[in-house]
Amino acid sequence: MSFDPRSLERLQELGRQLPKPLEAPTPQAQTKPQRQHRVEIEEDPEELFRQLMQVSPDGKVPEHLMARLRQLEAQRKRAPQEANAKRTSANKGTSSDPNQDDSLYSEFEQMLLEEDDA
């Protein structure tokens, strides 16, 4: 395709007038930390609930924050169960049943008495 000299000249002029592409944002602007509200960073479910009630004028809470509250409560319930399971596995042979403890104590006392008789 060929252009007449006048059209070619006009296209070159328009090309010089085109806007230049925007520069990429500086990394400094991207790393600027955004401040988060306490309800977004709170890890204690009870404190999160208090904060939610303080910021909610009518008691209504967005679903994503309620889901976060439920998740934190579930984590709190699981933590003691996991800790108990670790303690139980570490203390194998010991009993948490008081009746069994009494029984073992009685057997030990009986053995001591038998040794004294011998």
Image: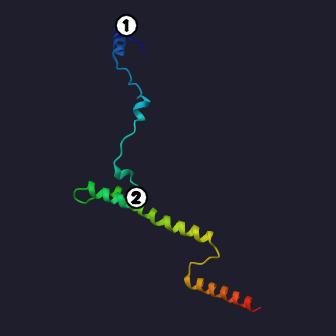
Q: Amino acid at mark 2?
A: Asp
Check the image and report above or below for 102 versus 26: below
Q: In the picture, which quadrant includes the C terminus?
A: bottom right
Residue at 27 percent across and 56 percent down: it is 54
Say which residue label 1 marks: 5
Say which residue label 2 marks: 44
Judged from the image, the secondary structure of the residue bearing numbered disc 2 is loop
Check the image and name the residue furthest to the bottom: 117
* Disc 2 packing (10 Å; few <14; some 14–19; many ≥20): few
Dividing the picture into quadrants, the one containing residue 7 is: top left
* Disc 1 packing (10 Å; few <14; some 14–19; many ≥20): few
Left/right of residue 93 with respect to residue 20 in the rendered view:
right
Q: Position of residue 76 (x, y in %)?
A: 45, 63
Could you give the CA–CA distance between mark 1 and mark 2, rounded to whole angstroms?
Answer: 75 Å
Q: Does residue 77 appear anywhere in the picture?
A: yes
Q: Amino acid at mark 1?
A: Pro
Viewer-closest of 13 and 90: 90
Q: In the picture, which quadrant includes the N terminus?
A: top left
Check the image and name the residue furthest to the left: 58
Judged from the image, the secondary structure of the residue bearing numbered disc 1 is helix
Give whichever of discs 1 and 2 has the lower sequence position.
Answer: 1
Check the image and report above or below for 51 versus 36: below
Q: Position of residue 6 (x, y in %)?
A: 34, 8
Viewer-closest of 22 and 10: 22
Q: Are marks 1 and 2 in contact (CB under 8 Å)?
A: no
Check the image and name the residue furthest to the top: 5
